[in-house]
Amino acid sequence: VGEFGSPTSSRVFVVANQKGGVGKTTTSVNIAAAMALRGLSVLLIDLDPQGNASTATNIEHGSGTPGTYEVLLDGMAIDDAVQQAPDIPNLTVVPATIDLAGAEIELVSLVSREQRLRQAIDSYVESHDVDYVFIDCPPSLGLLTVNAMAAAREVLIPIQCEYYALEGLSQLLRNIELVQRHLNPDLDVTTVLLTMHDARTNLSASVAAEVRQHFGDRVLQTAIPRSVKISEAPGYQQTILTYDPTSTGALSYLEAAREMTTHYPQKEQ
Ligand code: ADP
Ligand code: MG
């Protein structure tokens, strides 16, 4: 497998789904790692106070470590909060600390409270060579997620191949429309990724069929299989790409990442 091609300008993705446990963080870190290991320059922004994306990429994120909290609340430049992932060349990460837990409320009284992440990312990508930016969101549609949607051009929605997979999606899509109308007309749902897919079950097949029916060619051909190794990796502060590079989980994230680098679905009008 060779290197992936660079986009002509930085592509900024928000990884969103207000359901918890659908694979947002797993997808953010593993797609980011796969692209970085294939030679692309990738910035991962951890916007979930849980800090799971920071843990999985082995990034220092104890309370007080500069991170997304300082970027959002203090106007800190991303330059001053970003860390190089120790095990993955070309991957830089803005960590989330527990301090971010209060940000949802603290943001309310600030000027341009919805555009603070956008301002920070815009000025960072202007002066750095960044191919892809991924923003890992918390499981809610509050001001943190709104900041991410205002900052991104593309939405990546991970969908778990399980019962109730589509529940809540209409609310997510409605919120995306509101952001398009009021904050960011350039935002578009370009990419849907099926996660925790079990090829042996009818359930996975029927969820996948329903999602493909609804989202068409925005759904990546590659589905991520359910795999114990994928869930083990964060416990070793690793992505699946470094934890077990030849596992089916690693290969499927690599393939999904490769697809994304050549996947520019038509804008909906
Ligand atoms: P979210 O960020 O949407 O809350 P996570 O990415 O944290 O979801 O995933 C939820 C849980 O499912 C985690 O424990 C994670 O390790 C596990 N998980 C994610 N993807 C897979 C997979 N393909 N196979 C098995 N477990 C997975
Ligand atoms: Mg998460």
Image (cartoon, helix red, strand yellow):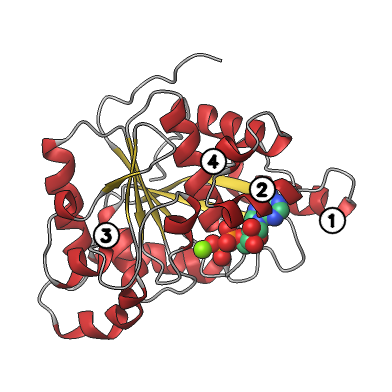
Q: Amino acid at mark 2?
A: Ile
Q: Which residue is mark 4?
A: 218
Of label 3 and label 1, which has the lower sequence position?
Answer: 3
Between 258 and 59, the one lying in front of the other is 59
Q: Nearer the viewer, mark 1 or mark 2?
A: 2
Q: CA distance from mark 3 to mark 4?
A: 20 Å
Q: CA distance from mark 3 to mark 1?
A: 34 Å
Residue 96: percent from left, percent from top: 35, 64
Q: Which residue is mark 3?
A: 150
Q: Looking at the image, which residue is at 34% across and 32% down? A: 90
Residue 16: percent from left, percent from top: 47, 59
Pointer 4: residues within 10 angstroms few (<14), some, or many (20+)? many
Q: CA distance from mark 1 to mark 2?
A: 21 Å
Q: Looking at the image, which residue is at 50% across and 40% down? A: 31
Of label 2 and label 4, which has the lower sequence position?
Answer: 4
Q: Which residue is mark 1?
A: 203
Regarding mark 1 in the picture, which secondary structure is present there? helix
Q: CA distance from mark 1 to mark 4?
A: 21 Å
Regarding mark 2 in the picture, which secondary structure is present there? helix
Q: Nearer the viewer, mark 3 or mark 2?
A: 2
